[in-house]
Each structure stands twice: as C-alpha cells, then as structure tokens.
Image (cartoon, helix red, strand yellow):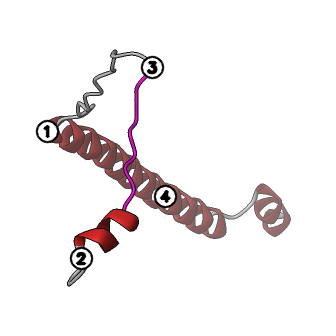
C-alpha cells in the first residue's frame, strides 16, 4: 500500500472506520431460475410451430383463393351471356 513508507507516515495517512449495524437481523436473498432450460426450449418451440402452422395455412388459403379466382375468370370469359345468345337467334 505505502511502498517505502515509515510507520510514522503510515499512521498519519491511514483511517480506521468502524461501522455498527442497528440490528443483527439479515435477509438472505436466493436467486432461483424461473424457467428451466427444457421448459424454455419447449415454449419457444411451441410458439415457433404455431407461427409456422399459421404461415402454411395462410399460404394454402392464398393458393386456393388464386385457383378459385382464376377458375372464375376463365369460366366467365368462355361462357356466353344470355343476352348474346338471345341477340344471335333473332
């Protein structure tokens, strides 16, 4: 601490601090993990599989909608209307 200091210099440059507690009671704080590693991995895996399932379902619904829309568009273009049939027979 004081390299090369004499005992007189050390006694003049040191401080003694005494701390007294008002009570001798104490609180022991213990840290416990709320999640184990396996529970955390299970929860993350469940959430990811739910999102993946919702995504695949959405892709399937968009594909189904596109097919139905394409079918509707092609069928209405091919089928002549009743007005066209009535005008050509007269």
C-alpha gap between disc 3 and disc 4? 72 Å
Q: Position of residue 59 (x, y in %)?
A: 42, 58
Residue 38, numbered label? 1
Disc 4 target residue: 62
Q: Which badge, 1 or 3, is on the more N-terminal residue?
A: 3
Q: Position of residue 10 (x, y in %)?
A: 30, 69
Disc 2 target residue: 6
Q: Which badge, 2 or 3, is on the more N-terminal residue?
A: 2
Nearer the observer: mark 3 or 4; the answer is 3
C-alpha gap between disc 1 and disc 2? 62 Å
User: Tag 4's secondary structure?
Assistant: helix
C-alpha gap between disc 2 and disc 4? 88 Å
Residue that extends furthest to the front in the rendered view of this protein = 8
Q: Is residue 17 above or below residue 3?
A: above
Residues shaded magenta: 14-21
Disc 3 target residue: 22
Q: In the image, what residue occupies the spot 39% across and 66% down?
A: 12
C-alpha gap between disc 2 and disc 3? 38 Å
Which of these two is toward me, 53 or 68? 53
- Mark 4 neighbour class, 10 Å CA radius: few under 14, some 14 to 19, many 20 or more: few
Image-based side of 59 in relation to 34, left or right: right
């Amino acid at each position: 601490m004081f390299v090369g200091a004499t005992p007189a210099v050390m006694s003049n440059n040191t401080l003694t601090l005494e701390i007294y507690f008002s009570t001798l009671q104490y609180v022991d704080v213990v840290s416990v993990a709320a999640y184990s590693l396996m529970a955390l991995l299970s929860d993350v895996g469940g959430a990811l599989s739910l999102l993946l399932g919702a995504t695949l379902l959405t892709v399937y619904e968009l594909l189904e909608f596109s097919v139905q829309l394409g079918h509707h568009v092609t069928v209405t273009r091919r089928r002549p209307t009743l007005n066209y049939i009535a005008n050509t027979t007269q």
